[in-house]
Image: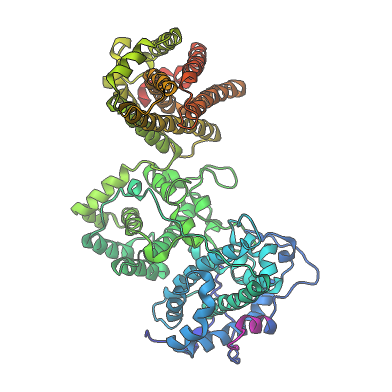
């Protein structure tokens, strides 16, 4: 068992956990009290010190005002004073227990959290001499508690609020636990007007010594009490508490840009953290604990600590480069405090351009956006802080990428001579090169490129699908005049494309060289063209959304075609097709011969529009609406294709007429020269391609 803190440690005045520095009267002098009862610890706490309400509610200006009217009338400061002695009594009580006693007495009441094994670990942290243990334990506890409260909310509610403050203000939880209990939780973790432990820690405001351990003890016992109250509620209502499954981090292979962190890299990082100006000395224990966590395979601990400290350091850089030192201060109840959302934004809250992206450079910004913000990215900080990830199964790959990025970032804030010397090491030189060449992987632009390439690859195998010779010949003879008209339209549309294709790289120079065999190469070349992704405006994102929907449906059509061809071929060979089914099979083969170049054409147009996506700014409102209308007509076409080519519908004879109509729309709109490839300036086209 780790050595215990002396009782004097927890009684010493602490710093305001809402502040980055300076001592204030948050850790009040303790008065020894009787240990809370074994049966109802939460009720005992609430009875001794209920959250006080002001007689005349006057809303205070807060950085993140709690939702709901009643919460605004809470006397947060007075309640904190009243709860101070209670917290100290709870803390002394827990320190008096052995781990075995804690497990027997309290762990059964923590089963409702779906992560009861976390709490003995946090109990150990109460007596740890490692100063980051309390903040890290509280971060885990608040995340676990938020997730568990969300499960309770869903007993009566339908959609769980995303923000903890909204969750605590909900009537659904008040109905289970009581309003007084929820008010106590708001004081601890639900409002910047209170202690705000959750946000203070997760946004990196508190130094390792600033959070008194008694608050961690109190949060443990509050969670125990919530379990007791919940059991009574479930017995009365006959409801059963369900737990949402944890989120599995996917697509990490797309983010695995940096190689595995070696012992050499860790040694360099250990040296750099002590000498980089990016890190405040008071925060150094967090970095040291992160490295210990990585070495001991506690990858969630490593990631949690690194994320909060990257935010702390970047907040300092943000305040410096934007010359707004006040934004550095604290998570105050009277001002909007600065988090990653503001740090990584294009503009400041006064409308001025944020200078941090210019200072860090696009590669670093793209990495941070990929890791933290993009909806299809891992969004690791969000998932961790909301308790959505199973901590013991947190992937090493994610912590590895954060560590590697941190090495490169810290070197920028290290003495030039030392930095230059360290960059001569092969492992560090490799990391720096990879970081400087980083480009977005989870931005909609990048995701669209992956979709197009994946769809193109699936269409490319169509000629390899099994076809009976007699059926193929019959399908060839079945070709209609409408099929020929479609082929003629495809030819006309393609004839206009060579001026917009990447001839500078020798892919295609004229119509004659744009044969069907070259289409995959052209599409791949276009998808390899760099497209700016940082701070895309709304219009660009809207167009990207429609293009991605088109690509998604093209992929579904391709998948359905492959499945249908294989199934019908097997049935044909085994002579299990009736006369009408054989005729439908011939319709399908005829349609497939047409659909292949049509889908290639659509993918080619998507890739061309993507390369010139930022030209959409040049359209006025009417032109933009007409352009969206055109794209949505193509989307409707591929949506209908998905329906008609499904094995349930199997209406292949309708696809040719549908395709002819869609090709006419493409040809007509192309003749108006209103596609992005037509509006792109010559210089832009050459520079972008």
Region in magenta: 36-46
Residue 205 can be seen, yes or no: no
Provide residue 13's location: percent of width, then percent of height.
54, 81
| Residue at 39% across, 28% down | 561
Q: Nearer the viewer, residue 146 or 59?
A: 146
On screen, residue 402 versus residue 376, left or right, reads left
Q: As displayed, is residue 82 above or below residue 639?
A: below
Q: Is residue 526 left or right of residue 349?
A: left
Q: Residue furthest top?
A: 481
Location of residue 291 by image quarter: bottom left
Q: Which quadrant: the N terminus? A: bottom left
Rendered location of residue 135, percent (x, y): 47, 72
Q: Would residue 285 be seen by someone viewing this image from the given angle? A: yes
Q: Position of residue 28 (x, y in %)?
A: 59, 82
456 is within the stretch colored magenta: no
Number of marks in picture: 0
Q: Quadrant of the C terminus?
A: top left
In the rendered view, tell whether residue 401 sits above or below residue 467. below
Residue at image position (37%, 63%) is: 393
Q: Position of residue 570 (x, y in %)?
A: 32, 30
The image quarter containing residue 557 is: top left
């Amino acid at each position: 068992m780790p050595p215990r803190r002396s009782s004097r440690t927890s009684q010493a005045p602490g710093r305001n956990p809402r502040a980055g520095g300076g001592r204030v009267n948050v850790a009040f002098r303790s008065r020894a009290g009787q240990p809370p009862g074994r049966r109802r610890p939460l009720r005992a706490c609430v009875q001794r010190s209920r959250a006080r309400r002001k007689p005349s509610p006057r809303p205070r200006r807060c950085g993140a005002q709690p939702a709901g009217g009643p919460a605004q009338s809470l006397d947060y400061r007075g309640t904190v004073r009243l709860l101070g002695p209670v917290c100290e009594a709870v803390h002394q009580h827990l320190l008096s227990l052995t781990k075995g006693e804690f497990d027997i007495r309290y762990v059964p009441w923590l089963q409702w959290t779906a992560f009861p094994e976390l709490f003995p670990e946090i109990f150990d942290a109460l007596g740890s001499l490692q100063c980051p243990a309390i903040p890290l334990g509280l971060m885990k506890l608040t995340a676990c508690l938020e997730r568990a409260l969300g499960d309770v909310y869903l007993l009566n509610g339908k959609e769980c609020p995303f923000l903890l403050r909204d969750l605590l203000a909900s009537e659904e939880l008040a109905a289970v636990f009581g309003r007084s209990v929820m008010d106590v939780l708001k004081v601890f973790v639900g409002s910047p007007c209170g202690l705000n432990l959750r946000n203070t820690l997760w946004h990196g405001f508190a130094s390792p010594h600033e959070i008194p351990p008694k608050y961690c003890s109190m949060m443990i016992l509050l969670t125990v009490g919530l379990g007791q109250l919940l059991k009574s509620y479930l017995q009365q209502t006959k409801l059963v508490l369900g737990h949402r499954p944890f989120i599995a981090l996917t697509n990490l292979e797309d983010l695995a840009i940096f190689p595995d962190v070696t012992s050499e890299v860790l040694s360099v990082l250990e040296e750099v953290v002590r000498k980089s100006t990016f890190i405040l000395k008071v925060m150094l224990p967090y970095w040291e604990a992160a490295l210990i966590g990585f070495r001991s395979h506690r990858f969630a601990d490593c990631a949690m600590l690194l994320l909060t400290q990257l935010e702390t350091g970047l907040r300092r850089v943000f305040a410096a480069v934007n010359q707004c030192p006040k934004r550095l201060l604290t998570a105050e109840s009277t001002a909007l405090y600065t988090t990653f959302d503001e740090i990584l934004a294009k503009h400041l809250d006064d409308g001025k351009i944020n200078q941090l992206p210019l200072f860090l450079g696009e590669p670093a910004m793209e990495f941070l956006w990929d890791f933290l913000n993009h909806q299809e990215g891992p969004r690791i900080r969000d998932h961790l802080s909301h308790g959505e990830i199973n901590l013991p199964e947190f992937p090493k790959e994610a912590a590895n990428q954060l560590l590697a990025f941190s090495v490169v970032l810290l070197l920028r804030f290290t003495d030039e001579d030392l930095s230059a010397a360290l960059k001569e090491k092969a492992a560090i030189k490799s990391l720096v090169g990879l970081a400087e060449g980083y480009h977005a992987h989870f931005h909609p632009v990048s995701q669209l490129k992956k979709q197009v390439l994946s769809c193109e690859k699936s269409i490319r195998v169509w000629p390899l699908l099994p076809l009976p010779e007699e059926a193929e010949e019959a399908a060839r003879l079945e070709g209609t005049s409408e099929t020929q008209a479609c082929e003629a339209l495809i030819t006309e549309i393609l004839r206009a494309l060579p001026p917009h294709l990447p001839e500078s790289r020798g892919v295609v120079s004229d119509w004659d060289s744009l044969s069907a065999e070259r289409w995959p190469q052209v599409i791949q070349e276009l998808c390899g063209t760099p497209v700016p992704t940082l701070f895309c405006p709304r219009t660009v994102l809207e167009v990207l959304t429609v293009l991605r929907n088109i690509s998604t449906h093209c992929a579904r059509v391709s998948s359905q075609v492959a499945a249908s061809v294989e199934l019908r071929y097997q049935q044909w060979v085994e002579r299990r097709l009736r006369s009408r089914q054989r005729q439908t099979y011939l319709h399908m083969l005829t349609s497939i011969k047409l659909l292949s170049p049509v889908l290639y054409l659509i993918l080619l147009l998507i890739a061309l529009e993507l390369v010139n996506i930022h030209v959409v700014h040049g359209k006025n409102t009417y032109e933009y609406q007409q352009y969206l209308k055109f794209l949505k007509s193509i989307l409707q076409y591929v949506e209908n294709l998905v329906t008609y080519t499904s094995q349930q519908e199997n209406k292949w004879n309708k696809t040719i007429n549908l395709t002819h109509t869609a090709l006419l729309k493409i040809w007509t709109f192309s003749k108006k020269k209103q596609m992005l490839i037509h509006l792109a300036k010559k210089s832009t086209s050459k520079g972008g391609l």
